[in-house]
Image (spheres, grey):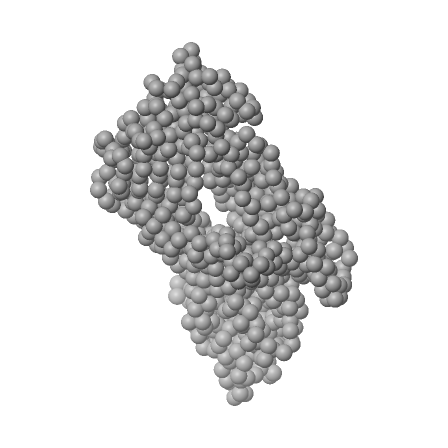
Amino acid sequence: MLFSGVVPAHAAGDPTDCQESVFDKSEVSTDVQLNQHRYDTGLITFTTVIEVPVSWPLSDGLMLSPKSGSYRKAMRCLLADGEGTEIRGAEQRDGLPVVTATKKVTTVTDTVRVALSDRSSHAIGPWKAKLNATGYHLTLHAPPALRRASWDVTLERDGNNLLAPRPKPLRLASDGTYAWENVQGAQGPQLTMTLDAPWRIRTVAMIGQYPASIFIRGLQAFAVLVVFVPFLFSRWRERRRHPVVLPHLRALTVAVGLQLVIALLNALDFGTYDILTEKTDMDVVLFRGVDLSWAYQGVIAAAWMAVAVAMFHLGVLRHVARVWVSLVLGSGAAAVAVVFYRVGHRAEIVLALDGVLSLLVFAGTAGVCLAAWRAARGRDTGWQHAGVSLTVGALAAALTLGSFLRNIIDTQRHQRWLLDNTSLDLDFDLVNYPSYLYDALVFTWWFAVLAALVPVLKSLPLGPTRRSVRLLVVVLGGIVLEDWPDWYAGVPVSLIPLTTTVVLLMGIRINKSHVLLTKRLTAASSGTTPPGDTLGELVAWGPPSILADLRATALAYHSLEREGRKLDAAWNSASDVDAEGYHQKRGSIERELARLSDWPPPTNGAASGRLRIRRGRRRNNNAVGRLPVGVTPVDVAMSLGPSTTPWQNGLRASQYMTIMSLPVVLYLYKENYDPSWFAQWFGSLSLAYWVLIPPLAWASSGFLLGFFWHELPGTRGPVKILPIALAYVIGMLLDSFVRYALDQSAANYQWGVTGLLTIALTITSVMMDANTLRAQRSSWATSWSPLASVYRLGAAHTAVALAVAQVAAIVSLWLQLRTGMDSGGAGSGSPTEGK
């Protein structure tokens, strides 16, 4: 927040102008409804119905245009608090008051809502609403025209205790509704009440408005730091072990660093603003005449402009120019920001600077994403990349800045509907535009981090993946699973990303001994000492042809196994089979199976068919070891997956998951669409985020499966998904438990989505296994024949049975949790509570 201005209040005029004597026999009623059960904040709705006599001189103005002075004057007399009419930024309205006229009376119905989460006092129609350390504090002050009217009030509470009302209510209905009739006071109808609020809603108010706002900003920064700092720490430790830096790894580190800078600078920006607005004498006390607000404003503006240039360098300039160009550009932009980002300069100049800053931010972000796309397709970047990035950035900047201006204008008009002076003042919002924009990027810049990770993953060599990269892949996979961060009792927490990361990495580490590729060779029959490397290392560091030889050997091995099973079945079912011929064939098969179990895989493994098996071909004299007991070439090939690198495996699995996510994504689009997104300051950003998150969540889960395929336990796909599914389920279970304990809104549909995601992961794992054996599919009846045979069933019933079991368990848990939440919320407390 760069600067704060004070908007003067506009007096409602002399109360005698409102002709209060005309309302002696008028009736006014207000229904107050409080909702907090399953809400993250307290939501209070005021519905006021006013009977306006036709003899009131201002009644004709009620039927005029809302832009007319007569209309605003009449509404101020009916809805203002009698002391003054301020800009009403907290009012949430679906529309202006409804006016219905008859021959005898005109009825004005006003419905307005307010969400209370801090100690700020809000003018809501004729009411004042505030959240303090005790609870919700509501005060009714009769507007000038209604001081002689008969005013009735009803209160529909959500299980709250009514504390110290003045005056006391006349009755309490069986449904828990309190009622006041003809409330009176020294200055007309007056009513004061306090409603108990749960501690999760009073968290901010209990520690005060000033420290709490800074506390929340600090926790937002911490939610980012706790997720991304481990990556930077891991990178620092790797510098000694791996002096050779992977291609694009520096750019990824810069992207993560920018994420941290945005979070920290945002906390410093709004935190300092809160200090300055709370301690108005700090300029004099600390600097004795130095304008601290001006100095702070210039520093913040320069810092945000420098960050924008850094983004532009990361996405565009580093591909076409040297670093000194970005340094010069950043210095110049920061200097310009210091000079011009102050209230008092022409709005056109500040608007132009906002446009430049938006262009730098979005062109840089587009450049990072475009570089990821080109790297995934194996293409280089150049001046064409810069041109496309600038074009996309200009369009995004125009949409974002245009959406901001349109919604700011609509908001000011909406808030000034009671004021005589309806002129708009955009200086304050234009100067603060950088703060608003980066506040929206605190939890969305990770998209650029994800894009910067793609070139690194594409260039990863065979062999063990660096810990920092593995950690970041898991962290981003947890972030896209749900809207980040999670809010509990008004406090931002990175619960699901941290839980997913810890559970998945611990699951991989605990089951490391069960991962086939970590096993080592045994001694060959010739007595040759096997190497000390693991199977995964032997494959990674072996000749390029070793993967093809391994897959061919695996298919030959499996063909021999099938032939052996058929031979055994014929021997067991028939009595006239030649025993000598059976033992000769069986011995030939066993010798060939033993030969195919030698390492490295025989180069003629694919040619080992039924006719050549019987010749008793000797083993490869170059064998240096034998696969461990109980491990076959089929197991090794299935553990490697259909592709050679983690990136290729992950990309293939993410493609499968993206295709299967389309029906679910379309359903989520239909259910979660909210037109109010377009009324937000950055509606285009909200819309893009909403569109990308559902398919990205499914694609990232598939990528996690493929990327860690070599490290997951088991030799068959349906078993490999268990650590990932467990990590997701534990994360969602912990989130649901915390929300249930706090009585917050619990998105139960996420359990259904998680169940469908687990089914899709199971199907993806089966498809990965099928593609592993696809190289020799021409010898099979269908593309699924080798898979069905490898699973050793007439069909892939193993995967189907596992999928059904997972679905049944997750759906049962989902229904049980939902039933428990509903029954717990309805059955707690006295009969009058929870109504």
Query: Whole-percent x and y of residue 364?
Result: 67, 56
Q: Residue furthest top?
A: 103
- 510 vs 159, left or right, is right
Query: Could you tell me which residue is drawn at 74 percent across and 55 percent down?
Result: 386
State the image quarter where residue 100 is shown.
top left
Extreme-right residue of the structure: 383
Q: Is residue 613 visible?
A: no
Q: Residue at x 55, y 69 (%)?
A: 232
On the image, the x and y values in percent for residue 345 come to: 68, 47
Using the image as rendered, state which of residue 136 and residue 3 is in the foreground.
Answer: 3
Name the one closer to the observer, 691 or 34.
34
Q: Position of residue 811 (x, y in %)?
A: 37, 49
Q: Residue at x 48, y 72 (%)?
A: 516
Q: Quadrant of residue 265?
A: bottom right
Image quadrant holding the C terminus, namely top left
Q: Is residue 166 visible?
A: yes
Count how many numbered circles sit on residues in the image. Answer: 0
Q: Is residue 562 above or below residue 126?
A: below
| Apparent side of residue 17 relative to residue 607 in the rendered image (left or right) | left
Q: Is residue 280 above or below residue 644?
A: above
Seen in the picture, residue 421 relative to 562 is either above or below; the reply is above
Q: Residue at x 46, y 23 (%)?
A: 17
